[in-house]
Image: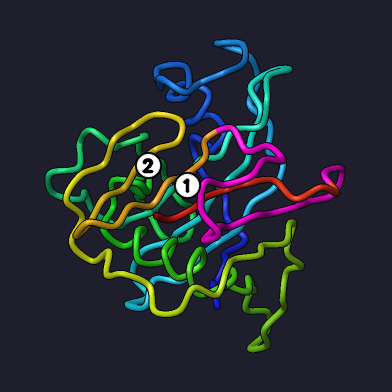
Amino acid sequence: MALLHRAELRPSKLDLLATWLPGKPWFAGTAGAEVTRVAAYRFDDPAGEVGIETILVRAGDGPVLQVPLTYRAAPLAGADRWLVGTTEHSVLGPRWVYDACGDPVYPPALAAAVLADAGQAEEYFEVDGRREVRPASMTLTGSRAGTSPAFDLVDEVVDGDPTLIRAGGAELALVRRPAPADAPTPSRLTGAWAGQADPVLLAYAR
């Protein structure tokens, strides 16, 4: 479960991405153009401390880009390279926003989705003591490859398309420009959303 808050963020996530995305090697679109949300999905942090959200966006008329983000209440030591920016959450206060590929909470969650079909976290609001579930904006389908390799201790992250996360001889590949495509391995994560009926390749493991 992922608890959401009816809150205002200044600057917004999309405003942060409009500034950050053009500097990435896998960026495609118009620098300076409005960044729009296409769909999104979330994973759970078992400790309940870090928000983990993947947003699919477009910059102007560019292709869909996949951006996993983590939201933290304090800076992550040694992760300046992955910092997207900071924002003020009207309920939670200051939040440090990171490219999740460089955040240690993300690789195990992605591995579980790719290799064990763990799916996405159900999103909900607390309303008068009741849970109000927000419908998912997209569907995810993973493989069932058995026990996933441990990605708790990552050896290397190589930014690109795909972005490669390596740990203990295993590798996760996050596709930055999702499109209908075959993965080089049966262990994959695909997704679809309104207006995109054919599943697109989001990530794979090898």
Label 2 Cα crowd, 10 Å radius (few <14 / some 14-19 / many 20+)? many
Residue at x-position 42% and y-position 46%: 173
Residue 59 image-quadrant placement: top right
Left or right? Give the position of 59 relative to 13.
Answer: right
The amino acid type found where label 1 is placed reads Pro
Which stretch appears magenta?
Answer: 177-196
The amino acid type found where label 2 is placed reads Asp
Residue at x-position 69% and y-position 45%: 200
Q: Which mark is residue 34?
A: none
Name the residue tied to disc 2.
Answer: 99
Against 129, residue 157 (above or below) is above
Q: Secondary structure at mark 2?
A: strand
Which quadrant, please, contains the N terminus?
A: bottom right
Residue at x-position 72% and y-position 78%: 132
Against 143, residue 87 (above or below) is above
The foreground one among 106 and 182 is: 182
Which quadrant, please, contains the C terminus?
A: bottom left
Against 178, residue 89 (above or below) is below
Which residue ends up furthest to the top in the rendered image? 31
The image shows residue 94 at horizontal and vertical percentages of 34, 49
Residue 109 image-quadrant placement: bottom left
Q: How many marks?
A: 2
User: Disc 2 vs disc 1: Cβ atoms closer than 8 Å?
Assistant: yes
The image shows residue 34 at horizontal and vertical percentages of 65, 20
Q: Is residue 57 magenta?
A: no
The image shows residue 63 at horizontal and vertical percentages of 68, 25
The foreground one among 128 and 87 is: 87
Left or right? Give the position of 175 relative to 169.
Answer: right
Q: Is residue 191 magenta?
A: yes
Left or right? Give the position of 114 relative to 201.
Answer: left
Label 1 Cα crowd, 10 Å radius (few <14 / some 14-19 / many 20+)? many
Name the residue tied to disc 1.
Answer: 68
